[in-house]
Image: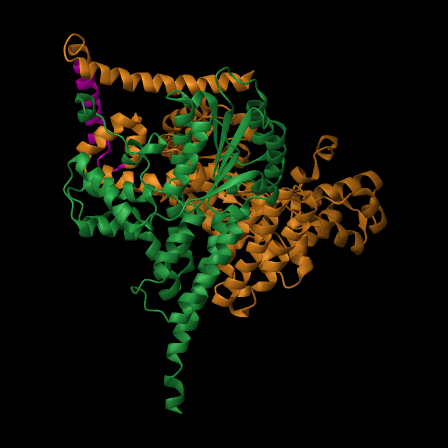
């Protein structure tokens, strides 16, 4: 009895049955259908990713389902699978036991997958993917923010099940039930206050209730308010963007931007990405982009002048300015699915190609004695034409300009490999010719020498300057 | 030339760049005055102003070459202000070089600042001080497309040389000369076409010439083929999907492709769009062409001021979607009253 008392309320009052999971009817239905398809042996996807705001019942549902369907739950938390070997071990053991005992099904639950660091936990994500591929048991992943770019591959191999933020009424009902079971007197105002603060996070509401109720034996509004500091919740990016885009008043939009830890220059990309989804009317779209571009101009002024005081205006324009631009009621409040900023994804995907282009432009700029940007706009496009249409000539240029293989391939997707081979042949020929000519044709040797001398001279002079500057 | 050149090739814009002043065939007035500096082994600070591809950078290098000989780069610091435009570069690199001791047998060192009109105002102020302080050992050559973007006090410290657009017959005869050297077959119409599409920019003209030659022969059809290939078809798709299809999201995807895959900058894109807007290929009212051009100018200004390429161009796409919608409504309307 006393041992039970010490259980935190969130554990003590965890739903034991599927029905006890508050609300989330849609998610329940999806999840149950999926589990049933596993039990019948033919799942369309081998894994499900449950996502939604904290405290909305994701883990609870999995636990309740496991209990009701008599499945063994193998649970892992983010801290357990920092290394790929941990996950591989799990995968192996479950697979083996599963085949030995034959009958009893399991659910493999990986909680907090968005907590995996893409860099520090290198390999962990890949081994989760392997796990999903080879599993003989349903794999359930849980995340608050599934739109993290590092989770992209996971998203593709999972059935996505969204959990909605619980309403205040949902939360209040659960709190009242707990008060009744704990035989606590509680004021309606206090319950209201706690539920309001929780913003749909049932777990934090129960924790708050416990903090007030256990210590004092009663829950009054005054106690609740004095005890509980405002729990500033970080809204996830989608929520913030939605609040901004559908805001009716300037203050709503501005306030929403305070509730995220996205930096303003990230937030603007999120808004940029999703404006067309809410602003489907061309007038709205144009107005919204005029505002966003004003915000962007303020950013450029901040960069140029260093006066961060201007940041508030940038934020005003990208939040309130955009929100009030979207007016057509037909689309303004329509629920649309938002997307992760494509730009961020593209930039990381194309980093290598952009680096090659940058190096190439630098090389050409030094040959042509022009700026790097001019090399990009005036030299590279024409080189591409040559490389796409005349591989033999392209190879001679590649040799003369001393282009790397990756630069050659960048200049022509079509002929890249061929030109690389041709260039290599030319290079060998040149070498042969030079050694053959050592005693032979004087002019050719001199030619070669002057070319080399010039290059050396170039190197020397640039080195000379560098050395000079280092001093 | 020797066997080496049968194997390796350079960009013709580099290969046929005049190395010394006397090799320069254009800008006779400028060249004559510069040759006087060489003869006297003395010169003031210089500002070369004029449109792109008229020989400013070439003249600066040729001048240094004639002053110091083959190893002229040892006595010259070259910077491109587009690539290094901040005040830090002026305070560190340029200052260090400008105040360093004068090598023997050299009357002064040269700092060459190309595209100097891209320097920030702060950097220009810092530069002005350096020009005063170290004038006894260092001379500056500034190169700019738009000399008005160079602050007054610097302009007044420089001898200004205006480079004029190169005449059509001069460009064509230079291209001919290169063709003869390279043993490339050409016809006059083709060379004239190159002049037309390059807007008198010699560097661009030579780049186009080399690409057209790589296609086999320099004729009109190959010249336009080169220009067409070098202008991604997606630029036209941008106008089509916004103005006629009203599909913003699709257009924005194309925009991203152009910027990421082709590496076009926002300003490049604005310029290419500007060319397309006036093409007869697009059936839009004449006044709309002007309205779009005006908005393109506004966007380019914002970009030059440092705004974000993708956001500003998206704003442009949004504007085009709106214009396209209005256009469709306007053409749909006349039928309504007749029904009544």
Query: What residue is shown at x 38% (from left), y 70% (from top)?
Result: B286
Q: Nearer the viewer, residue B70 or B34?
A: B34
Magenta highlight on residue A429: yes
- Left or right of residue A303, residue B339 in this image: left
- Measured along the vertical axis of the image, is residue A98 above or below residue B247? above
- For the question of whether residue B82 can be seen, the reply is yes
Q: Residue at x 15, y 13 (%)?
A: A441
Q: Quadrant of the N terminus of chain B?
A: top left
x and y percentages locating residue A362 in the rendered image: 40, 31
Which x, y percent locates residue B306? 54, 46
Q: State the residue in front, A405 or A182.
A: A405
Q: Residue at x 17, y 32 (%)?
A: A392
Residue at horizontal 40%, vertical 92%?
B340
Is residue B232 visible to us here? Answer: no
Q: Is residue B149 placed above or below A106 in the rendered structure?
A: below
x and y percentages locating residue A448 in the rendered image: 24, 17
- Indicate whether B98 appears above or below A268: above
Chain represented in green: B
Question: Which of the pair A260/A463 is nearer the observer?
Answer: A463
| Image position, residue A272 (x, y; %) | 52, 52
Return the residue nearer the eye: A257 or B45: B45
Residue at the extreme bottom: B340
Main SS of the magenta part reads helix
Chain orange in the figure, letter = A
Horizontal side of residue B295 vs A224, given as left or right? left
- Whether B303 is drawn above or below B330: the answer is above
How many dots with numbers? 0
In the image, farthest residue toward the top: A439
Q: Which residues are magenta?
A: A412-433
């Amino acid at each position: 009895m006393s041992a039970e008392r010490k259980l935190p309320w969130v554990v003590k009052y965890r739903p034991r049955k599927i029905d006890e999971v508050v609300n989330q009817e849609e998610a329940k239905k999806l999840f149950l259908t999926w589990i049933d398809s596993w039990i019948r042996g033919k799942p369309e996807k081998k894994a499900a990713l449950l996502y939604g705001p904290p405290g909305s019942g994701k883990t609870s549902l999995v636990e309740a389902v496991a209990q009701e369907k008599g499945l063994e739950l193998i649970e892992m938390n983010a801290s357990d699978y920092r290394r790929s070997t941990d996950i591989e071990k799990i995968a192996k053991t479950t697979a083996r036991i599963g085949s030995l005992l034959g009958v009893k099904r399991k659910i493999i639950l990986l909680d907090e997958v968005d907590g995996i660091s893409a860099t520090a936990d290198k390999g962990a994500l890949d081994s989760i993917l392997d796990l999903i591929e080879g599993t003989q048991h349903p794999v359930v992943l849980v995340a608050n923010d599934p739109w993290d770019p590092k989770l992209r591959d996971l998203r593709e191999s999972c059935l996505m099940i969204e959990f909605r933020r619980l309403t205040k009424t949902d939360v209040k009902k659960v709190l009242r039930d707990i008060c009744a079971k704990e035989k606590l007197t509680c004021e309606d105002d206090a319950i209201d206050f706690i539920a309001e603060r929780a913003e749909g996070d049932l777990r934090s509401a129960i924790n708050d209730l416990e903090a007030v109720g256990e210590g004092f034996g009663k829950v009054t509004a005054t106690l609740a308010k004095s005890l509980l500091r405002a729990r500033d919740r970080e809204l996830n990016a989608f929520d913030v963007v939605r609040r901004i885009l559908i805001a009716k008043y300037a203050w709503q939009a501005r306030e929403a931007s305070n509730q995220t830890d996205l930096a303003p220059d990230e937030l603007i990309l999120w808004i940029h990405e999703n404006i067309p989804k809410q602003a489907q009317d061309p007038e709205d779209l144009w107005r919204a982009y005029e505002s966003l571009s004003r915000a962007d101009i303020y950013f450029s002024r901040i960069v140029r002048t260093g006066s961060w005081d201007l940041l508030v205006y940038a934020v005003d324009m990208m939040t309130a300015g955009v929100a009030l631009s979207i007016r057509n009621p037909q689309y303004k409040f329509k629920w649309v699915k938002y997307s992760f900023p494509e730009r961020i994804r593209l930039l990381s995907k194309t980093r290598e190609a952009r680096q090659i282009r940058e190096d190439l432009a630098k090389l050409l700029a030094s040959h042509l004695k022009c700026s790097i940007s001019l090399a990009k706009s005036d030299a590279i496009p024409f080189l591409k034409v040559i490389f796409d249409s005349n591989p033999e000539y392209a190879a001679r240029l590649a040799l003369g300009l001393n282009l790397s293989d990756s630069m050659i391939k960048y200049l022509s997707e079509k002929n890249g490999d061929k030109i690389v081979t041709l260039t290599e042949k030319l290079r060998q020929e040149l070498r042969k010719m030079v050694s053959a000519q050592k005693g032979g044709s004087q002019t050719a040797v001199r030619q070669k020498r002057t070319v080399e001398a010039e290059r050396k001279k170039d190197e020397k002079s640039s080195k000379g300057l560098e050395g000079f500057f280092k001093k | 030339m020797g066997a080496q050149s049968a194997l390796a090739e350079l960009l013709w814009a580099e290969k046929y760049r005049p190395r010394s002043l006397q090799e320069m065939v254009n800008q006779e007035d400028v060249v004559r005055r510069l040759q006087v500096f060489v003869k006297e082994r003395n010169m003031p600070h210089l500002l070369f102003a004029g449109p792109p591809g008229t020989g400013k950078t070439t003249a600066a290098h040729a001048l240094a070459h004639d002053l110091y000989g083959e190893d002229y780069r040892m006595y010259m610091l070259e910077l491109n202000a587009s690539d290094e435009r901040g005040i830090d570069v002026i305070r560190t690199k340029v200052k260090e070089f400008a105040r360093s001791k004068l090598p023997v047998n050299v009357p002064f060192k040269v700092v060459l600042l190309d595209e100097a009109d891209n320097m920030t105002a702060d950097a220009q102020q810092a530069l002005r001080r350096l020009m005063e302080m170290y004038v006894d050992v260092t001379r500056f050559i500034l190169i700019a497309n738009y000399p008005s973007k160079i602050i007054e006090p610097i302009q007044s410290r420089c001898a200004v040389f205006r480079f004029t657009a190169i005449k059509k017959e001069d460009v064509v005869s230079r291209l001919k000369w290169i063709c003869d050297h390279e043993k490339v077959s050409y016809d006059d119409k083709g060379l004239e076409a190159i002049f037309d599409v390059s807007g008198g920019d010699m560097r661009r003209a030579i780049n186009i010439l080399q690409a057209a030659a790589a296609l086999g022969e320099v004729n009109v059809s190959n010249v336009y083929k080169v220009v067409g290939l070098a202008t991604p078809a997606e630029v036209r798709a941008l106008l089509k999907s916004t103005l006629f299809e009203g599909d913003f999201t699709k257009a924005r995807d194309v925009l991203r492709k152009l910027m990421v895959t082709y590496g076009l900058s926002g300003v490049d894109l604005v310029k290419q769009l500007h060319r397309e807007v006036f093409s007869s290929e697009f059936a839009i009212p004449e006044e709309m062409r002007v309205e779009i051009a005006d908005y393109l100018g506004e966007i380019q200004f914002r970009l030059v001021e440092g705004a974000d390429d993708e956001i500003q161009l998206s704003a442009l796409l949004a504007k085009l979607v709106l214009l396209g919608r209005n256009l469709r409504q306007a053409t749909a309307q006349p039928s309504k009253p007749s029904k009544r």
